[in-house]
């Protein structure tokens, strides 16, 4: 009988992990193809996006679907990217995704390369992203967008 319970628990764990990783894959696909409304829908209503290494003047956190949309709506106007080299790190919590990946692309306004390396820590709930902590190098963004923190902040400003 314990084998049956263990197998059922493993199946549940596997399906939660698969849903969490698929949400992450969808995040990369929607963002790289400029499908921002679909990207926002990957998040829970109270979803949070955090940037621990944000430069001065750049948001360190945005929350809720309206805030996420407002923050990310101009991304396709500034970057053309392809996400590559995705690697998931297995966790004991199947709803938690830790991923390493890279972007290969350009900043559209400058034509400069935007080749970034990321580590993402993503919490999911029922297959939706509830908290996304984005570890990336802001210097790469600054160089791609014009060499200064102000250029990068302006690219994500909705003024």
Image (cartoon, grey):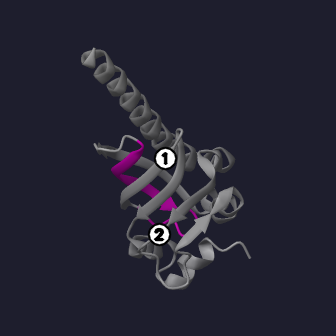
> Disc 2 on helix, strand or loop?
loop
Residue displayed at 56% across by 61% down: 48
- Magenta span: helix, strand or loop, mainly? strand
Residue 3 in percent (x, y) is at 25, 17
Residue 126 in percent (x, y) is at 54, 39
Label 2 belongs to which residue? 51
Q: Nearer the viewer, residue 18 or 157?
A: 18
Vertical arrangement, residue 47 with respect to residue 29, above or below: below
Q: Are marks 1 and 2 in contact (CB under 8 Å)?
A: no
Q: Which callout, 1 or 2, points at the residue further toward the start of the chain?
A: 2
Q: Which quadrant of the structure image shows residue 143?
A: bottom left
The label shown at residue 124 is: 1
Foreground label between 1 and 2: 1
In the picture provided, is 159 more to the left or to the right than 55?
Answer: right
Q: Nearer the viewer, residue 30 or 44?
A: 44
Magenta segment: 95-114
Vertical arrangement, residue 35 with respect to residue 16, above or below: below
> Disc 1 on helix, strand or loop?
strand
The residue furthest front is 1
In the picture provided, is 119 more to the left or to the right than 59?
Answer: left
Residue displayed at 38% across by 60% down: 115
Residue displayed at 74% across by 76% down: 159
Q: Which quadrant of the structure image shows residue 73?
A: bottom right
């Amino acid at each position: 009988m314990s084998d049956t319970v263990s197998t059922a628990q493993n199946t549940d764990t596997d399906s939660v992990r698969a849903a969490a990783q698929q949400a992450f894959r969808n995040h990369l696909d929607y963002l790289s193809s400029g499908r921002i409304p679909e990207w926002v829908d990957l998040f829970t209503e109270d979803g949070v996006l955090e940037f621990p290494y944000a430069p001065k003047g750049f948001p360190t956190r945005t929350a809720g679907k309206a805030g996420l949309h407002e923050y990310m709506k101009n991304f396709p106007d500034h970057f053309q990217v392809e996400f590559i080299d995705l690697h998931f790190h297995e966790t004991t919590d199947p709803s938690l995704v830790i991923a390493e990946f890279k972007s290969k692309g350009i900043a559209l306004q400058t034509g400069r390369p935007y080749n970034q390396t990321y580590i993402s820590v993503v919490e999911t709930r029922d297959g939706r992203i509830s908290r996304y902590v984005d570890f990336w190098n802001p210097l790469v963004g600054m160089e791609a967008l014009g060499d200064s923190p102000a250029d990068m902040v302006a690219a994500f400003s909705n003024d």
